[in-house]
Image: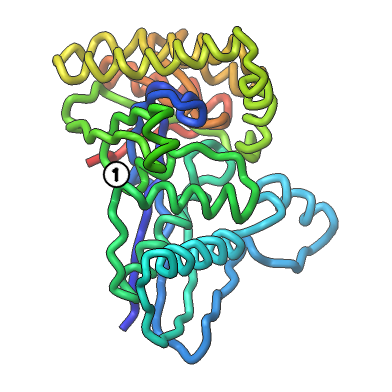
Amino acid sequence: MIIETRAYARAGLLGNPSDGFFGKTISISVRNFGASISLYQSPEVHIEPQGPDTNTFKSIYHLRDAVASLGYHGGIPLIKAAIKQFGEYCEREGIRLPNRNFTIRYQTSIPRQVGLSGSSAIVVATFRALMRFYQVDIPLVLLPTLVMKSETEELGITAGLQDRVIQCYEGCVYMDFDRTMVESKGHGQYEPVNPRALPKLYIAYKTALGKQSGRVHNDVRSRWLKGEKLVVDTLQEIAGVAQRGHDALLNNRQAEMHDLVNENFDLRCRIYNINESNMEMIETARRIGASASFAGSGGAIVGTYQDDDMLNRLFVELKRLDARVIKPYIS
């Protein structure tokens, strides 16, 4: 029997990137793109390499371009990290796994390095496959933390819980990463939001902008750890934007989301350097009348739009910037 599991891309709608700083966020799963895992029993544990894991290149320029878009590692390190964390969780919980091995392979359609969480999707899908194969039930509230540790502790990737929460819960989720709760229980408070409460949303991305998100966050993290007032205050304000957005959605005030999305990005600009190509997408979308903010760490934007005419203008104008526009499939 072959076990098939899947995890989807995600977009941070409000509060991004305060999740890594005990803030609050609202995120959506983006089912237009996903990472899938196939797993079946075999004599030994075997991870099948895929295209991004290749060590053979046509030239040094091919290698250069591959590293620029995919990083130095493909999906295999992520799968190894997930398997290790899964095994250690079972050991801690006194769960004795049967003596069964497996072969595992992955596929992904999530655009790489544009802030749509392609790496964590592979880890989430791997955990789901292992849970089914070994018939282990990990509480949903704990799963995002294990996924995050697979990346932070095993691979040294700078990451917050937001991506992993929405990819585990799916749909739309409001997250409160209260420091006391996170440090005492290992997770925040996660509240699903009815996707029907959301306004009309679009996502646009440029694959050529790819950067590893850990590098983007490092400077701000060090400044936050030093207690720099501008950074600390701004991240608190960004978290407040998510809280206000949550209130707006619960009380059917969708129109407020337009300004909140823009405010989120404008606050981000206080403490993060935004490259020209990313800013070009933001400004183009806003000029048309849509709101716009980063979906993650850069390379993709998310926002609200009013009607089909505005959406068509987004398609046309952002295509001139070599950006693709999609309507996220959330439910």
- Find the residue positioned furthest to the right: 60
Where in the figure is residue 233, as x and y percent of width and height? 52, 9
Label 1 sits on what residue type?
Answer: Glu
Q: Which quadrant of the view contains residue 288?
A: top left
Residue situated in front as seen by the camera: 306 or 19: 19
Where in the figure is residue 310, as x and y percent of width and height? 33, 16
**Quarter of the image with the N terminus in it:** bottom left
User: Residue visible at 34% across and 28% down?
Assistant: 176
User: Residue visible at 43% across and 63% down?
Assistant: 89
Residue situated in front as seen by the camera: 275 or 79: 79
Q: Is residue 244 visible?
A: yes
Where in the figure is residue 220, as x and y percent of width and height? 64, 23
- Find the residue positioned furthest to the bottom: 43
- Residue 220 vertical placement versus 162 (above, below): above
User: Residue visible at 51% across and 9% down?
Assistant: 266
- Residue 136 vertical placement versus 251 (above, below): below
Residue that carries the numbered disc 1 in the rendered image: 170
Where in the figure is residue 298, as x and y percent of width and height? 57, 29
- Residue 196 vertical placement versus 263 (above, below): below
**Quarter of the image with the C terminus in it:** top left
Crowd band around label 1 with a 10 angstrom C-alpha radius: few (<14), some (14–19), many (20+): many
Q: Is residue 162 visible?
A: no
Q: Which quadrant of the view contains residue 231?
A: top right
User: Residue visible at 63% across and 26% down?
Assistant: 221
Q: Secondary structure at mark 1?
A: loop
